[in-house]
Amino acid sequence: AINWSIPDQLLLEGVERLKMSTTSQKHRDFVAEPMGDKPVTALSGIGEVLGKKLEEQGFDKAFVVLGQFLLLRKDRELFAEWLKDTSGANSRQAASCSQCLTEWCDAFL
């Protein structure tokens, strides 16, 4: 009989490659380190236009948006709806930001 099992290391490398192919460089950069005083536009899914809209409502830093995410008890769907209502983000942008904050929290909280 032939052993077709995949060694764990290869499986882990495949999972990492899949993660990298489905997240942006901006996302990977953000979740790789503490957020410190980064601007709101450092968040995945938040570009200049959405960043400006968020800044106008007092959400000028990534940590302030994180605070809202935490107030919503890390509920990704609720946060995505809040972000769409607050900034006019589309579903893809809201999901990207939500995923980014979820992974950051998993790594640093």
Image: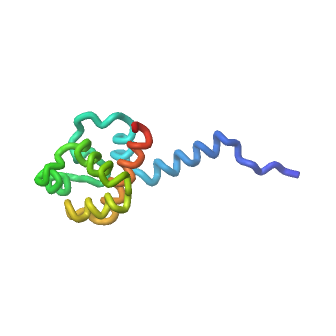
Q: Position of residue 74 (x, y in %)?
A: 37, 52
Q: Nearer the viewer, residue 42 or 24?
A: 42
Q: Position of residue 85 (x, y in %)?
A: 22, 65
Quadrant of the image occupied by residue 107: top left
Q: Position of residue 99 (x, y in %)?
A: 39, 53
**Image coordinates for residue 56, horizontal then vertical, percent:** 11, 53
Apparent side of residue 31 relative to residue 55 in the rendered image (left or right):
right
- Color theme of the render: rainbow
Along the line of sight, the residue nearer the viewer: 52 or 21 = 52
User: Which residue appears at 53% of the width and 45% of the height?
Assistant: 16
Specify whether 2 is left or right of 21: right
Residue name at image x 38 percent, y 43 percent? 104
- x 46%, y 48%: residue: 20
The residue at 34%/41% (across/down) is 30
Q: Nearer the viewer, residue 92 or 17?
A: 92
* 81 w.r.t. 62: above or below: below
